[in-house]
Image (cartoon, rainbow, N blue to C red):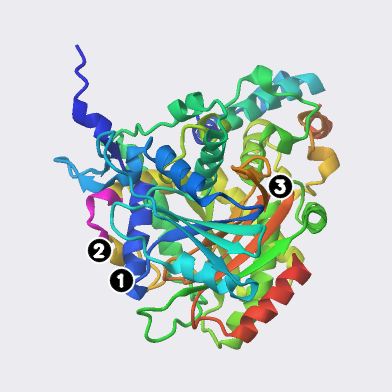
Amino acid sequence: MDSFNLIRYYSQSVEGKRVMEFKSVEDVETRLTREVALILSLEQEAIRTDVPLPSLGLDSMGFVELLVVIEKVFALRLIETGLTRNDFETIHALAARIHKVLPE
Amino acid sequence: MRVNLPYSRQRRYLTGMDWMVAALDTMTNRNTGGHNTFQLVLELKGALDPVRFRSAVEAFTSRFPVLAGRPSRDWTLAPYWKIPPAGQPVNVPVEFCQVEEQDLFLRLEESANRTLPDCRTHLAFRVFQVGLDRQFVAAQFDHHLFDATGAELFLALFHAWARGEACEERIRQISLKEPAHLRDWMQKFEAGKQLMRMLTRLSGVPLKCLPRPIPLRGRKTRFRILSFTEEQARAIQGRADREAGFLMFMPYALAASLQALGPAFARRGTLGTEFLVSVSVDLRTRETLAAKVFFNHMSFLFFQIPERLIADRARLMETLRLQMYEQIKSGFPKALDDSSMLMRIMPLAPLSRLMLKPLRGEFASLGFTCVGKSGYPGNRFMEAELVNLIHMPLVPVPPGVGFFINQFDSRMNAVLSYLDGMLTSEDVQRLDDDVRRVL
């Protein structure tokens, strides 16, 4: 499924389901890894969570695609926040940032 | 039982984007007599042996009969690229000449503006020798057959092949398969509706466009090349991170380009209150990179910026980021790609006129492309050291002015491409100074 069809699919996400699905940072990280793999058309196993996103092959376009998917899956509109390197550089950092702001 | 008809190997169907690029070529040719081509300049330290280079080009390009093809239509009216059978000659002109340092830039400009000799020649090499140990290889590509990334990938493959590296597998991976796309019509029409909504919204907007000189016919494209060292490029990237955000280099660079160009528009007394920038974006993924060397694999984003925002850098970048986000969220690049399939039925001449109707004879205020990671790895080209790789694209007319940013080997280049007469020498020098200051 290409990333643009994924965005249409995720528009049906339900908030309650989201809260249950992402109890830990690892849950968020697993999901982000899957999404990045889809955007880059790579196998999930090939995606390292501790490597800077540009090194995985993500550019401006790919990064914005990821932010769009994050909005759909986690209901977080990160494009309007400060996109600092520390918070976004790796999947692991991004997962921690997202998990911190998800409702309990 | 499936029967593979032999003619299908000689046929690669053109996508909607291929057809749009062809329409831009028709538009430009009608206006100025020029064509939709672009040139990659490889700055070399060292010298290529002319005999060896010519021989390598002839042997390598003969592997790709697609290089000698031309557009045609089949009985369904779907356009396709007619590929000659293997073994037919592939014409790729190669020229060598000695030039003085002070004449080099003009010669590169002339080379970029040259018309390829015939409708079956889509690639040419011109090698300019400066002094004893510097060469500039100007590789001119026809946009019908190559986009910017594809051209870099092709040169990289040529280099690997010429050096005797094992690249048969890479050559086999290149795919010329493209279906006719004569199905999923509802999806295409839905995409067309999305495009029409955007065009309808834009049609009421008073666009700022630079006046085009009269007459247009015979005018050449001029260039100003700004090259940044590794240290400068790293500083630019750092500023982009801090001011625009992580991985937001494209909006940062676009903001800088607009801030530099804005005063030139103001000095020319342009009417209109909004800039519209068409930004080409590559649609290849890592998986498809090796396969998609030939033809066009890109789409566009369109940014609409009120003139009053140009002076407010922070708000300008925020606006660009949000517009980029909303267009990608709505799936616009893919919608444009899908809907453009519907335009393939139109002949190029009327299509090239129709494309200008929504915006009353205009296409955009300017064009912009930012190629991130280079498709050319390493810093060698054949037996020479590759110092820099610069893109010199001819911007279609209209709009006749554009910025092209590429990165190569930790360096960065920003190239202003404009139709002769649209900007004065003073405009260009000020622009050069401003880009260096704001980027």
Residue B14 in the image, given as x and y percentages of width and height? 32, 43
The residue tagged 2 is B349
The residue tagged 1 is B30
Front position in the image: B190 or B362: B362
Q: Residue at the location (73% across, 50% down)?
A: A80
Q: Is residue B189 visible?
A: no
Return the chain for callout 3.
B
In screen coordinates, is B7 left or right of B228?
left
Three-letter code for the amino acid on which mark 3 is drawn: Asp
Return the chain for callout 2.
B
Residue B314 in the image, given as x and y percentages of width and height? 76, 64
Marks 3/2: CA distance? 41 Å
Within 10 Å of disc 2 (Cα), the crowding (few <14, some 14-19, many 20+) is some
Within 10 Å of disc 3 (Cα), the crowding (few <14, some 14-19, many 20+) is some
Whether label 3 touches label 2, CB < 8 Å: no
Q: Is residue A60 above or below residue B8?
A: below
Q: Name the N-terminal-most of marks 3 and 2.
A: 2
Marks 2/1: CA distance? 9 Å
Q: Name the N-terminal-most of marks 2 and 1.
A: 1
